[in-house]
Image (tube, rainbow, N blue to C red):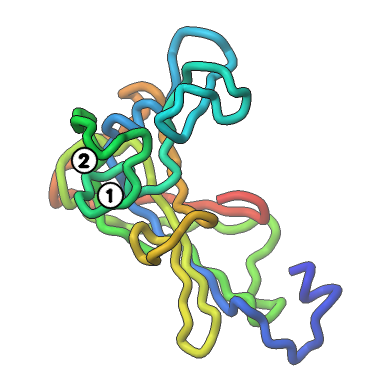
Amino acid sequence: RDAWERHLAADAIVVPKMARIYAQVVEGGHYINNIHGPIHGPSNVALRTSGSDKDVFLGSAGGILLPIHAESLFKCNNSLFKLGEAPGDKDTKSYSTALSESAMVMDFDFTSKELIPPPEGRTREVDLTCIKSGLGQAVLFWWELDLGDGQIYSTQEGKAPWQDHWQQCLYVFGPTTNDTLPLTEGENFTLIAKHDDTSI
């Protein structure tokens, strides 16, 4: 919006032309449960993204292992990303499970000022079908960009051979079972997606 208002000519070609946000409801497992952090304990929660016991920010010992690739959430035998594990480690973790197919929940057209959503954003309701019974504990979401001439860049898990800058995002509902959504295979449910100029 700011670019159209202050920098672009009326006939400007914008790259990317469009963006789309996709989402998928997932059940927890080891990593998603850990993302909640300790229920009791110090107010400062240490974070780590590897097998090291050093806090990623402070360098102190202890903390919660946070994956930075969505592939780490799922049991994926050919994944290159097994954070915190050496090749010979015994795998004892409970992995996450996709409870719905992925669905487009938002789209954005940047090709003209008039097509850009207002600053307060939009709310969309997307109908989904549960593909496996379980407790919905989080929404995994990612985006793709239309760069023009048929060129698409996607941050979907496993879509690109190298993804270390732009990643998927995980929205965790909350730390208790009251925050989960019980789902039964074949059941239809509605996912509500919202955005404004700074968040989704």
Front residue (pair 79, 11): 79
Q: Where is residue 196 in the image (x, y as percent from the top left)?
A: 63, 54
Assess disc 2: are there few (<14), some (14-19) or many (≥20) residues with their C-alpha within 10 Å of its C-alpha: many
Identify the image quadrant of residue 113. bottom right
**Res 183 label:** 2
Q: What residue type is labelled 2?
A: Leu
Q: Position of residue 199 (x, y in %)?
A: 61, 49
Identify the image quadrant of residue 85. top left
| Residue occupying the point 31% across, 23% down | 177
| Residue occupying the point 28% across, 56% down | 128
Front residue (pair 147, 131): 147
Q: Where is residue 39 in the image (x, y as percent from the top left)?
A: 43, 13
Please, is residue 183 above or below residue 129 in the view? above
Would residue 71 appear left or right of 110 to someone viewing this image? Answer: left
Report the residue marked by disc 1. Answer: 189
Please, is residue 105 above or below residue 181 in the view? below
Identify the image quadrant of residue 15. bottom right
- Between circles 2 and 1, the one closer to the viewer is 2
Q: Identify the residue at the far right of this view.
A: 6
| Residue occupying the point 36% across, 33% down | 84
Q: What residue type is labelled 1?
A: Phe
Q: Position of residue 60 (x, y in %)?
A: 57, 18
Check whether the beta carbons of the residues at disc 2 and disc 1 lie within 8 A of each other: yes
Assess disc 1: are there few (<14), some (14-19) or many (≥20) residues with their C-alpha within 10 Å of its C-alpha: some
Q: What element carries label 2?
A: strand
Would residue 95 appear left or right of 67 to someone viewing this image? Answer: left
| Residue occupying the point 58% across, 75% down | 109
> Quarter of the image containing the N terminus?
bottom right
Front residue (pair 109, 153): 153
**Res 78 label:** none
Would residue 196 appear left or right of 189 to someone viewing this image? Answer: right
Task: Tell me the distance, in whole angstroms, between the alpha carbons under discs 2 and 1.
Answer: 8 Å
